Image (cartoon, rainbow, N blue to C red):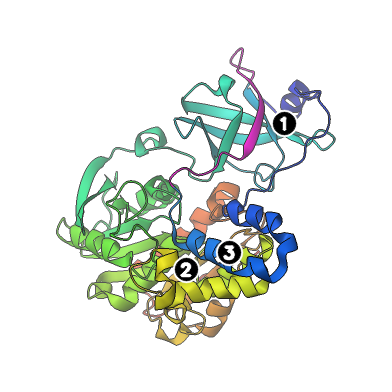
Amino acid sequence: MGDNNLRNLVGTPFRDTQNHGTKRTIRWSAVGAVTGALAGTALAAIPTLASIFARTVVTPEPHPAEDVRIYRYRPSTDTTTPALIELAITSQTTVRGQYALTFHENQGVARVGEIVAIDRKHQTVTRVVEEIYSGDLSRAVRGRWAGFVWPTPHEAGYVYQDVWIPVDNGLAPAWFIPPTRQTQFHDTWIITVHGRGSKRNEGLRMMGVAQRMGMPGLLVSYRNDGEAPDARDKRYGLGATEWPDIEAAILYALNNGASSVVLAGYSMGAAVSLQLIQRSALARYVRGLVLIGPVIDWLDVLRHQARINRVPHPAGKLGRWLIESPWGRTITGLAAPLDFRQLDWVSRAADLTHPMLILHSQDDDFVPIGPSEELAHKNLRYVSLVRFQQARHTREWNVDPVRFESAVLTWLHVLLSGISHDRPSLPGAISAE
């Protein structure tokens, strides 16, 4: 069925009510809400805002907000008519590609694809529902827009095993996906490291590459993600405390047939991976890193988040100090303060001696691309950068899976074939759009 036929099905919007405002989808929306409430209290509000900001940065969110309004779901009536859903327009829902829509407190999951109509007057977008994995979408009124696409390897069509990795405080669940064909790369595993607030299914978008390369895939969980055992303080370390769980995953791989690994880190998962290659005795087994929408400099991210959530500069600065200072532990709940200098890889560019490929969108609305560009410029020997457009945070694959996989496959072939000991050559890597 062609695009024109799809559009004809929704020539008239499902909903006929008047304008509705678009709700922002910033993950730290609580900060913005409190900022607005305290806006008129000037300096008296600074310590309160700083405390909320600092706690929000390091505290896991057990139930992410379902902040996308669902107006109507129309199921398919025959083999030629697609199922459709009408949603509120947000900065996320109007971007092309495949995504997951979760609803009913994550009990329901659907895969949503092509945009077939946008109604600016009523602020709605209509998209194709490709598959409903669980839940009753016809009864959903709110949902969460996510980038993971498939809930588990089963829905993605992969044969897999549930495995358990020994970590601090217990066992962390992981998925092992064996390759479907034997290649020279069979003993190099791809270990995926998901981002802040995400889960291991985020890494399923990397498994198409792993299968084509003939590489085993290990999709891991780590502390405070709702699947692995929590850290003792139940707080994020922004990479500084999570890396031992990934070290445990590497040890598991080495004990089960791997001779080396490639780490694929998303967002904060990239920050975790970067800490590992600097701090782990097993770093010598890491052949390279693929980093998607990576946090290269946490201070840059926090300044960006403070700005878009209207946190006054003094409050943002004080919030960062609370995270770094021993005096702030009673407010943040951290077992130990974090050192943002150790989390700034632009300043530490010369310390990085592992080949790495960065895939980052110029339209990333959560982690700005600037530090990735700076790192690639300062460390030309080891760092390749491929820029994307339109994609929101860590959704480069969703917008253009062909280009994403082509870039990673080319880079991996060069890296693992031993052609170069430094940065694998990638045509147009730094200047790609």
- For the record, the magenta segment spans 62-81
Q: Position of residue 154 (x, y in %)?
A: 35, 34
User: Which residue is outermost to the left?
Assistant: 255
Query: Badge 3 is on which residue?
Result: 48
Which label sits on residue 3? 1
Q: Please check the rendered image and state whether residue 71 is part of the magenta-colored stretch, yes or no.
A: yes
Left or right? Give the position of 50 relative to 44: left
At 40% from the left and 45% from the top, the residue drawn is 201
Check disc 2 and give the amino acid type.
Leu
Task: Give the spatial CA distance, label 2 vs label 3.
Answer: 40 Å
* Mark whose residue sits in front, 1 or 3: 3
Check disc 1 and give the amino acid type.
Asp
Q: Is residue 266 above or below residue 303?
A: above
At 82% from the left and 38% from the top, the residue drawn is 120
* Mark whose residue sits in front, 1 or 2: 2
Residue 329: quadrant of the picture:
bottom left
Of mark 1 and mark 2, the one earlier in the sequence is: 1
Query: Badge 2 is on which residue?
Result: 357
Could one spot residue 371 in this view of the protein? no
Of mark 2 and mark 3, the one earlier in the sequence is: 3
**Where does the N terminus fall, quadrant-wise?**
top right
Task: Provide the secondary structure element on which disc 2 rests.
Answer: strand
Q: Is residue 204 above or below residue 102?
A: below
Check disc 3 and give the amino acid type.
Thr
